[in-house]
């Protein structure tokens, strides 16, 4: 609500692109780069007089499971929770970050059910949002993610032999909307973290890839990132340019990159490949069980512990088949005192995942289309993310890229966290690091609408800020000059304008000036943009 001080006032509304949080400048001794991921968290740490490095946890592992075990009044994280997952699945929620800022009907939340998770979120009437029910207690996704982030602080403090650091940069997926980013920032606030910036996962990896690059001629690099629950593809152009550190210093050549295009499949990841192995083992086991018992209705799916053991085994099978052609599978007394005993070959796995492999290359074309490029414009491709280790996936991506050599020049698991930490060092006043130019883009169009306050039907002071298709459709009215509006009937006064088109460059600020003599209702919205093709389903 904008209050006027006289019969006529002029208000200027400055709308910044909120898809990347405005950097909060800090003067800290250490900064964390946290790649939260879907099921594994990686943390990088940059501190004074020390190199940029990955934090190892209490078990000397370089990545930490994103799960929390609630047992006998205590919380266990990472490997401590994972080691007891098979025995206490009903007490161990995981994949909480997938649910941030989303409701129970969101496609990314619904897909969790098909992944055979022991605890899936449900709608909580009191909170009016998603909650995980654990031992008669309800936890919101924000609370659970805050616990994981707090654990990241603790292991970073132990690793750096210092008090737990507060300043950090968090990664988000390319398709994260403002709702989801805001929910992540809420989690960080609960964990008492000072978020310097948000950076997209592929952009962070691209920053780590370009830290030491100074290319004389622009080159286009595609980053293919398959994580646990999603697949993201970004195209970045690397170049060099002249830059002065200060007004009177001598110009020097520095490297930089610009994100040109993005594509994704937000429901296809490595866990989906594991799920097809689970389904296959379930059918094999149920067939053997019913034959041995002389029944037709016994189903291992009815047992939570048994299904959790199958999920754990499926992940092991997938990892082993990445380097071997066959693996024996045996789980003693899986269900009803019946063991699971079978063999799974790489050929069988590829047969089961045939349709998924075809889906896996679709984001490549989407990224090319958004960048207005063809395969001939791409100079190289870099494979990142845990899912890229599947040989059949590599073969499918290589085939779709015209047999281009797949680059693996950066660490597929750690590059996002390292890039995030390096970005944090850039925005902090405590570190002086090599300058790398970076320009990201926002795939979603953003519109602004102004109405007389009483006509807004009590939507709130700022209405549905970044609302989606669930809200009322924004009224579409042409933006007219102030002089023309002054003479018109005030009952229908309304202004609507697209302030950022899809694929707009980040870091741009726009100002909209208007004159009006009444209180107004302001709505910043995704759905008011007529052509917003990249907006994820369920927003």
Image (cartoon, rainbow, N blue to C red):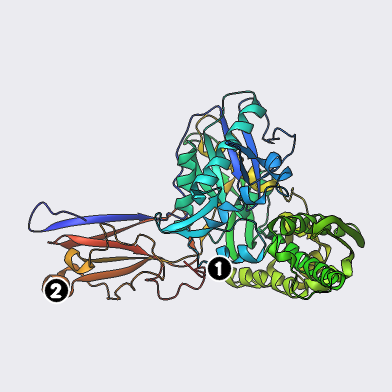
| Image quarter hosting the N terminus | bottom left
The image quadrant of residue 24 is: top left
Q: Position of residue 186 (x, y in %)?
A: 45, 46
Task: First in sequence, mark 2 or 1: give its number.
Answer: 1
Q: Position of residue 165 (x, y in %)?
A: 55, 30
The image quadrant of residue 292 is: bottom right
Q: In this rendered view, identify the residue nearer to me: 312 or 340.
A: 340
Left or right? Give the position of 154 relative to 478. Answer: right
How many neighbours does mark 2 have within 10 angstroms: few (below 14), some (14-19), or many (20 or more)?
few
Q: Are marks 2 and 1 in contact (CB under 8 Å)?
A: no
Q: Which mark is residue 327?
A: none
Circle 2: element type: helix
Residue drawn at the location 61% of the way across and 66% of the way down: 111
Residue drawn at the location 84% of the way across and 74% of the way down: 294
* Structural distance between the alpha carbons of marks 2 and 1: 40 Å
The answer to whether 493 is drawn above or below residue 439 in the figure is below
Circle 1: element type: helix
Left or right? Give the position of 501 relative to 230. Answer: left
Q: Position of residue 364 (x, y in %)?
A: 67, 69
Name the residue at the left extreme. 7
Asked if residue 471 shows in the view, the reply is: yes
Q: Position of residue 8 (x, y in %)?
A: 10, 58
The answer to whether 198 is drawn above or below residue 9 in the figure is above
**Residue behind mark 2:** 491
Q: Which mark is residue 107?
A: 1
């Amino acid at each position: 609500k904008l209050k006027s001080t006289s019969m006529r006032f002029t208000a200027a509304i400055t709308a910044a692109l909120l898809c990347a949080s405005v950097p909060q400048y800090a003067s800290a001794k250490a900064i964390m780069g946290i790649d939260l991921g879907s099921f594994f968290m990686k943390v990088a740490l940059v501190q004074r007089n020390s190199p940029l490095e990955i934090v190892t946890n209490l078990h000397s592992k370089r990545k930490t499971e994103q799960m929390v075990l609630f047992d006998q009044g205590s919380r266990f994280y990472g490997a401590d929770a994972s080691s007891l997952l098979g025995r206490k699945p009903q007490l161990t929620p995981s994949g909480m970050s997938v649910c941030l800022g989303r409701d129970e009907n969101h496609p990314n939340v619904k897909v969790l059910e098909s992944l055979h998770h022991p605890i899936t979120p449900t709608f909580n009437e009191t909170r009016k949002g998603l909650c995980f029910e654990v031992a008669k207690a309800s936890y919101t996704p924000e609370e659970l993610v805050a616990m994981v982030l707090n654990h990241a602080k603790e292991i970073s403090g132990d690793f750096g032999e210092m008090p737990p650091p507060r300043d950090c940069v968090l990664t988000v997926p390319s398709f994260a909307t403002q709702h989801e980013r805001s929910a992540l920032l809420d989690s960080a606030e609960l964990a008492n973290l000072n978020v310097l910036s948000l950076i997209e996962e592929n952009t962070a990896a691209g920053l780590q890839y370009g830290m030491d690059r100074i290319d004389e001629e622009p080159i286009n690099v595609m980053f293919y990132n398959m994580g646990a629950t999603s697949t993201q593809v970004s195209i970045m152009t690397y170049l060099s340019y002249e830059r002065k550190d200060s007004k009177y210093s001598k110009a020097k050549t520095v490297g930089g990159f610009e994100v040109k295009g993005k594509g994704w499949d937000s429901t296809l990841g490595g866990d989906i490949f594991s799920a097809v192995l689970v389904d296959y083992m379930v059918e094999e086991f149920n067939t053997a069980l019913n034959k041995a018992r002389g029944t037709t209705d016994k189903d291992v799916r009815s047992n939570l512990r048994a299904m959790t053991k199958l999920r754990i085994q499926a992940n092991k099978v997938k990892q082993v088949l990445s380097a071997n052609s066959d693996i024996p599978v045996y789980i003693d007394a899986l269900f009803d005192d019946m063991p699971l005993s079978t063999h799974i070959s790489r050929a069988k796995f590829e047969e089961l995942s045939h349709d998924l492999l075809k889906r896996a290359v679709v984001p490549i074309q989407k990224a090319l289309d958004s960048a207005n490029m063809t395969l001939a414009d791409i100079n190289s491709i870099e494979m990142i993310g845990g899912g890229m280790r599947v040989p059949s996936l590599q073969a499918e991506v290589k085939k779709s890229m015209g047999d281009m050599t797949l680059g693996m020049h950066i660490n597929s698991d750690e590059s996002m966290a390292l890039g995030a930490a390096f970005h944090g060092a850039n925005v902090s006043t405590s570190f002086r690091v090599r300058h790398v130019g970076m320009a990201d883009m926002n795939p979603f169009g953003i519109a602004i609408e102004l109405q007389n306050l009483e006509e807004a039907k009590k939507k709130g002071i700022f209405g549905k800020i970044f609302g989606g298709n669930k809200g009322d459709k924004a009224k579409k009215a042409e933006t007219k000059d102030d002089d023309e509006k002054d003479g018109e009937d005030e009952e229908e006064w309304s202004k609507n304008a697209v302030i950022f088109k899809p694929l707009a460059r980040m870091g741009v600020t726009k100002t909209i000036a208007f004159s009006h003599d009444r209180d107004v209702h302001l709505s910043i919205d995704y759905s008011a943009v007529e052509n917003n093709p990249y907006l994820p389903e369920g927003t």
